[in-house]
Amino acid sequence: MIPVAFDYERATSAEQALSLLAEHGDDAKLIAGGHSLLPLMKYRLAAPAVLIDIGRLEELSYIRDEGGELAIGALTRHFDVENSDLVQSQVGLLAAATAEVGDPQVRHRGTIGGAMAHGDPASDLPAALIALGGSLVIDGPSGRRQVDVDSFFTGFLETALSEEEMLVEVRVPKMPESTWSFQKFNRRAQDWAIVGSAVVINNDSCGVGLVNMDSRPIRASAVEEAISNGASATEASELAAEGCEPPADINAGVDYRRHLARVLTRRGLEESGR
Amino acid sequence: MQVTININGQSVSHDVEPRTLLVHFIREQAALTGTNIGCDSSSCGACTIHLNGEAVKSCTMLAVQADGQEVTTIEGLADGDALHPMQQAFHECHALQCGYCTPGMVMAAVSLLDEKPDATEAEVREGLEGNLCRCTGYHNIVKAVLQVGGAK
Ligand SMILES: Cc1cc2nc3c(=O)[nH]c(=O)nc-3n(C[C@H](O)[C@H](O)[C@H](O)COP(=O)(O)OP(=O)(O)OC[C@H]3O[C@@H](n4cnc5c(N)ncnc54)[C@H](O)[C@@H]3O)c2cc1C
Ligand code: FES
Ligand code: FES
């Protein structure tokens, strides 16, 4: 399978990538690792006229300790996040969720920024970022802005990013004392989640993000609230599918997905010590 | 556009369309047909090569993304007539039947042990999750990898 023909530009700096985006407008697409975009282009579900390659922007590949938060450059590959001592010790949930993405070959190419910007409800990392309460740093023609994770995912494959903007950094609060669990249900080792549940408990606060339970990555607010009010894991997890509109597909129907969300969230809460 | 890739220590340069996949560049421009295409959709791992020493699926990369980089294919592993230890172990452990998955499997296995020299059996099985084999049932493949490295 071969994509529709396109023009190719390789950005040598973040600044140049932004000016190329401004120049080409909505004919253009950024390509980072290409592990979501290229499959779509090969199936001809996407046909950008111009590809702007940001895959070599070393300046956006880093993991930094910035006091209360970790700052992770958008071009940081899954492999580097998964194996980072900082991520493992400060936000274990993110390291664990990243290690569940696809297979080693995919994790050698795919980036954290690409996973967020793609906005796929079936993706593991957005759910983890929701549970952790992170934020996203966006750069564009009108300057830099920071968006809370709860305002970033706006619909199916849609995010707060405009066509002329680029995601430059993912920020995650450090929580070295937290307990957490990433529960992913699939049928074959490398598959996407049929449903997933990312749970983190930090002091008295609880965060739960769900994979593939709505048209966008979604927070299980009812579960979080119940836990804060002293509910048990069993009681709280009964609320996991509340307010969700899960998709039905060849792997699972709506009711089965709701069931999975409850079971996986209970397991996640239990594994996190609740 | 002109794309130059160092493949198995040799510089290969061709004028190709930007949409040319890396696997096609390797098979057609560089005429190295050891790298197979199986699913063509990043699931099976038959097209696995090393990009700068790390296993990647060459059906899910553009040749332009590898411009100026180093690629190793299955043809680049052996030292003359002496098989690479991983190839030798596949041979000795009967880790292949039809052989279609084998080039990708060997490349993935070498990259796995580079990153995790003391991999346990479970880690080897997990580390090869991106490579499918329709014939062997995997047991002998895992045995071969553990013969080369891994926790004994
Ligand atoms: C076989 C296979 C299995 C997979 N399994 C899983 C899985 O189990 N779980 C999972 O979560 N994911 C999975 N993935 C997806 C993988 O995580 C991708 O790497 C990731 O979703 C996208 O990252 P990328 O860098 O490859 O993005 P790309 O494909 O390069 O880009 C994706 C989209 O984001 C945009 N984009 C990229 N970077 C930026 C940026 N910095 N700013 C603005 N827009 C940007 C692009 O324009 C494009 O629209 C799988 C992929 C494959 C091929
Ligand atoms: S042909 Fe590339 S993964 Fe199957
Ligand atoms: S030996 Fe036939 S597919 Fe693996």
Image (cartoon, grey):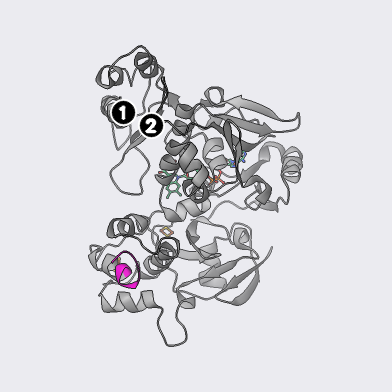
Q: Which amino acid does label 2 sit on?
A: Thr
Asked if labels 1 and 2 share a chain, the reply is yes
Which residue is more in the foreground, A206 or B127?
A206
* Left or right: A70 in relation to A260: right
Q: What element carries label 1?
A: loop
User: Nearer the N terminus, badge 1 or badge 2?
Assistant: 2
Chain of the residue on which disc 1 is drawn: A
The image's mark for residue A273 is 1
Q: Name the spot of residue B40 as percent of width and height, x first.
A: 43, 57
Chain of the residue on which disc 2 is drawn: A
Q: Name the spot of residue A273 as percent of width and height, x first.
A: 31, 28
Q: Is mark 2 on a helix, strand or loop?
A: strand
The part of the image, by quadrant, that contains residue A182 is top left
Q: In this view, does A200 lie above or below A105?
A: above
Q: Which residue is drawn at 56% across and 50% down?
A: A33
Mark 2 and mark 1 in contact (Cβ < 8 Å)?
yes
Q: Residues within 10 Å of mark 2 (few under 14, many from 20)?
A: many
B148 inside magenta stretch: yes
* Left or right: A69 in relation to B101: right
Q: In this view, does A193 lie above or below A235?
A: below
Give the extent of the magenta segment.
B145-152
From the image, tell me which residue sits under label 2.
A179
Which residue is more in the foreground, B19 or B138?
B138
Q: Which amino acid does label 1 sit on?
A: Gly
The image's mark for residue A206 is none
